[in-house]
Image (tube, rainbow, N blue to C red):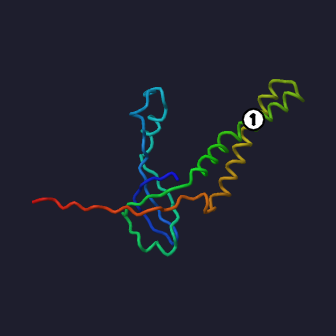
Amino acid sequence: MLEETGKVISIESNSLWVETIKQSTCGSCRAKKGCGQQLLSKIGNGSANINAIVDINDTNSYAVGDSVTIGIPENIVVLSSLLIYCFPLLLMIVFSGIAHIYLYDDVYVAFLGFLGLFLGGGLIRYYGQKMRSNPGYQPVVLDKQSQVLQVPSA
């Protein structure tokens, strides 16, 4: 299970809105300035709001400002990544291969390749919209973090 810690910003009937801080590993990578991740992390505001499912009887034990741990199963992340990256490329290769076999012109091969790529992206978008309400694909609240209050010394 992939886990992330965040702060509760809103409470709904069966879920919590949790603000997480995006973690960046740019300091430990050898690529340094050759990678676009550092630039992308500077553009964003550094946080994300995530709607995490919690047991309907358990929402009363949370308050705005609580620190919680949310998680999503690793197999969901792996499957989603595989679909997002590989399915459009596979359709691009299939469409351009069909164009190459039957149409023999490079313009048609390129056009149908891009058509397959965009069709694959559209199908993935449709699938994502359909799975958006599936509870198996949603982050869940795993644990409530205990916050230690420090009393300032006089």
**Quarter of image, res 19:** bottom left
Q: Which residue: 41% across, 49% down?
A: 21
Q: Which residue: 61% across, 52% down?
A: 76
**Spot occupied by residue 20 in the image (x, y as percentages of width and height):** 43, 53
Above or below — where is 87 with respect to 101? below
**Spot occupied by residue 52 in the image (x, y as percentages of width and height):** 51, 61
* Placement of the C terminus among the 4 image quadrants: bottom left
**Spot occupied by residue 105 in the image (x, y as percentages of width and height):** 85, 24
Q: Secondary structure at mark 1?
A: helix
* Residue denoted by label 1: 92
Q: Residue furthest left?
A: 154
> Which of the pair 84/150 is nearer the observer?
150
Q: Is residue 103 left or right of residue 47?
A: right
Q: How many marks?
A: 1
Above or below — where is 81 with respect to 60? above
> Which of the pair 36/111 is nearer the observer?
36
Say which amino acid is labelled 1: Met
**Quarter of image, res 63:** bottom left
Mark 1 neighbour density, 10 Å: few (under 14) some (14–19) many (20 or more): many
**Quarter of image, res 7:** bottom left
Q: Is residue 85 left or right of residue 37?
A: right
Q: Which residue: 41% across, 56% down?
A: 6
**Spot occupied by residue 101 in the image (x, y as percentages of width and height):** 88, 28
Q: Which residue: 70% across, 52% down?
A: 126
Above or below — where is 116 with respect to 13? above
